[in-house]
Image: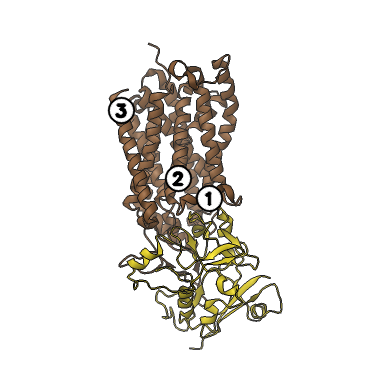
């Protein structure tokens, strides 16, 4: 094991452990340790859910490209795609845990599931996708589970043919779940008629496009870090770069399309949303648009793809931009309280009924008409810890399992 | 039977007695208010936003027939009781706060910490206890408990603990102007049904399609 690999494992493992300890502390004290209030009921954790779900799309892009569109040159990256998908989809499930007020009661999801709830659909499809990714990864690794790993292998006559046959069979099923996780996660938000910012049919297709962009970037980055940026994978990286760019453009189009319609009609709710998106969060909004666009644009350039630092930087820029996009899901929905009415006798006034905050904060009114949220240290540490978990899992798998194609020297 | 409430805005004097009665009887933790009374259009209660425009709006759970909170609850902790009230099972709720996000009226409140700690933080007198003192079960489910468990969502129950004993909700009893009436919306001859018909009763945010069972009677225009 290389020094980088070892230190990577140690750092990510330690961070994950730290987040776990902080979560235990939050379990004892309650969600009072976060900066959420009654009117702002979801924060960084749920942004994290949307972020990790998006990152998990890498497996989807690779399998569909290989088996549906016959793009053979990215086949060496298929296992990395399935692995990053598994790591991110499990991270998505993990980040929900600290957001739950009583996680020990989660068994109620099995005992009393309400099948009307998009959250139940999401739990189902996330688990199915995690399972499908794991099985798919295993099938792909099967021919190489030899020597000290042979105890892991199922006994079949011809592992190579078996792997090829079953990968082809599992791929379409995994694809279905893969699209499902983005669509259903988007539905959690877009079915909420109470929040004008989310209540739009464009959200599910937008989630799919963001996911294809960022999920592919995650695979590209992982591939470049593992294999380097030499001639051998030039073609594969070029294909991925193209997919990333197109998906980013589709995402920005869908987002702008929604904003234009909101802004053009000019309802009072829209003004509130715009004031938040382009007022309070103007810089972050510019970043959520510019960073993915610049990142994806740079990845189109062969010179960028040939240099590991440039490729890594461009990928990081895109991923950071998408993270900003996920964070901005919340403010425009929660900054102003719902229950906005036009008072009788004041036809042109828009007025919101204040909400009790639910927690005592010196200097803050009990009733809030508006609340600006920024995450607490506890929330940040837990989110970073879950990110570290995903990295740890990928590194651990790479160092122990035949994930990477063997170099023939 | 479909429980409903009618609030006569002509009779509401904005005194917030119902808020306090609700808070006390339901032993709500500090900074938690199931029932809110404000002056529409004004950022200061009891201060008219414009000359001649002055009425007050009490808002609590609207006990919607098509309740988004009930639909989104992943574990069915929020449920419709047989009489039409929307209740929360404190033993079932996992605290995901999806319902709080989905409610267009912003009536749902979360227990961010243990009630005892919240009392300390707000500097309540030590061992000060208030509210209905016993646990209460409706249809076998825990819908009221004096000290709320940390990490669950709560809201107006139409005072399930009192109604099951044949008494009226605390806000109805506590209103000095008798602005609130409860009754059966399914019965066309009930007082609530007659009031809604005679006085053009309306609901809040009808465009959200939630079908509230709390109706408001408009105030008469003021002479200035």
* Residue A245, visible in the rendered structure: no
> Can you say whether A46 is above or below A362 in the image?
above
Question: Quick one: A380 or B45, which is closer to the camera?
Answer: A380
In this rendering, the count of numbered labels is 3
Distance Cα–Cα, label 3 vs label 1:
39 Å
Chain in brown on the image: A
Q: Compared to B49, does B100 lie above or below?
A: above
Judging from the image, what secondary structure is the residue with disc 1 in?
helix
Horizontal and vertical percent position of residue B31: 40, 68
Report crowding for label 3: few under 14, some 14 to 19, many 20 or more residues within 10 A (C-alpha): few
Q: Which quadrant of the figure has residue A14? A: top left
Q: Are marks 2 and 1 on the same chain?
A: yes
Q: Which mark is residue A49?
A: 2
Q: Crowding near pointer 1: few (<14 within 10 Å), some, many (20+)?
A: many
Q: Which mark is residue B200?
A: none
Residue at (71, 76) in percent of width and height? B188
Position in image of residue B108 (x %, y %): 49, 64
Mark 2 crowdedness (10 Å alpha carbons): few <14, some 14-19, many ≥20:
many
> From the viewer's perspective, is the residue at label 3 or at label 1 nearer?
3
Of all chains, the one bearing label 3 is: A
The residue pinned by badge 1 equals A188
Q: In what quadrant of the picture does the N terminus of chain A appear?
A: top left
Given the image, what chain letter belongs to the residue carrying mark 1? A
Where does label 3 land, which residue? A6
* Residue B212, placed above or below residue B192: above
Residue at the right extreme? B188
Taking the spot 41% from the left edge, 28% from the top edge, the residue there is A397
C-alpha span from label 2 to label 1: 11 Å
Q: Colour of chain B?
A: yellow
């Amino acid at each position: 094991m290389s020094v980088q690999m070892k230190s990577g494992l140690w750092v990510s493992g330690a961070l994950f452990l730290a987040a776990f300890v902080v979560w235990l502390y939050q379990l004892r004290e309650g969600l009072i340790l976060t900066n959420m209030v009654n009117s702002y009921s979801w924060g960084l954790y749920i942004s994290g859910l949307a972020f990790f779900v998006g990152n998990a799309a890498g497996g989807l892009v690779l399998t569909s490209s290989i088996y549906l569109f016959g793009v053979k040159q990215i086949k060496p990256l298929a296992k990395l795609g399935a692995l990053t998908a598994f790591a991110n989809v499990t991270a998505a499930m993990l980040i929900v845990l600290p957001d739950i007020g009583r996680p020990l009661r989660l068994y109620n999801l099995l005992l009393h599931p309400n099948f009307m709830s998009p959250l139940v659909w999401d739990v189902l499809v996330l688990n199915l996708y995690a399972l499908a990714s794991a099985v798919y990864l295993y099938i792909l690794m099967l021919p190489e589970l030899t020597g000290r790993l042979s105890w892991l292998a199922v006994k079949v006559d011809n592992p190579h043919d078996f792997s090829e046959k079953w990968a082809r069979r599992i791929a379409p099923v995994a694809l279905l779940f893969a699209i499902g996780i983005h669509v259903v996660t988007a539905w959690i938000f877009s079915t909420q008629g109470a929040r004008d910012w989310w209540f739009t049919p464009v959200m599910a297709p937008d989630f799919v496009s963001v996911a294809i962009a960022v999920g592919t970037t995650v695979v590209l980055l992982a591939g470049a870090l593992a294999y380097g940026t030499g001639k051998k994978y030039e073609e594969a990286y070029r294909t991925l770069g193209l997919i990333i760019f197109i998906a980013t453009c589709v995402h920005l189009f869908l987002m702008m399309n929604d904003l234009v319609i909101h802004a053009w009609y000019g309802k009072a709710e829209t003004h509130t949303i715009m004031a938040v998106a382009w007022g309070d969060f103007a810089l972050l909004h510019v970043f959520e648009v510019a960073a993915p666009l610049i990142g994806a644009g740079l990845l189109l350039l062969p010179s960028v793809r040939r240099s590991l630092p440039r490729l890594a930087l461009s990928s990081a820029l895109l991923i950071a931009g998408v993270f900003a996009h996920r964070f901005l899901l919340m403010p425009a929905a929660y900054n102003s309280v719902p229950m906005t009415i036009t008072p009788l006798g004041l036809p042109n006034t828009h007025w919101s009924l204040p909400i009790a905050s639910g927690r005592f904060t010196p200097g803050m009114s009990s009733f809030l008409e508006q609340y600006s949220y920024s995450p607490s240290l506890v929330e940040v540490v837990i989110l970073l810890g879950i990110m570290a978990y995903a990295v740890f899992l990928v590194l651990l798998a790479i160092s122990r399992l035949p994930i990477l194609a063997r170099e023939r020297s | 039977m479909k429980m409903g409430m009618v609030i006569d805005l002509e009779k509401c004097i904005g005194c917030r007695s119902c808020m306090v009665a609700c808070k006390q009887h339901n032993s709500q933790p500090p900074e938690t208010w199931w029932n809110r009374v404000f002056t529409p259009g004004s950022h200061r209660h009891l201060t008219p936003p414009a000359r001649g425009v002055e009425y007050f709006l009490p808002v609590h759970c609207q006990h919607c027939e098509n309740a988004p909170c009930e639909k989104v609850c992943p574990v069915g902790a929020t449920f419709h009781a047989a009489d039409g009230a929307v209740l929360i099972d404190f033993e079932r709720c996992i605290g995901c706060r999806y319902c709080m996000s989905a409610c267009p009226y912003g009536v749902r409140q979360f227990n961010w910490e243990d009630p005892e700690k919240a009392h300390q933080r707000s500097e309540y007198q030590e061992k000060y206890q208030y509210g209905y003192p016993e646990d209460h079960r409706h249809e076998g489910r825990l819908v009221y408990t004096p000290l709320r468990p940390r990490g669950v969502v709560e809201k107006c129950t139409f005072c399930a603990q009192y109604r099951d004993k044949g008494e009226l909700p605390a806000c109805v009893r506590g209103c000095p102007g008798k602005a609130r009436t409860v009754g059966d919306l399914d019965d066309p001859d009930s007082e609530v049904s007659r009031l809604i018909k005679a006085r053009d009763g309306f609901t809040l945010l009808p465009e959200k399609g939630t079908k509230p069972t709390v109706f408001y009677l408009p105030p008469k225009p003021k002479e200035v």
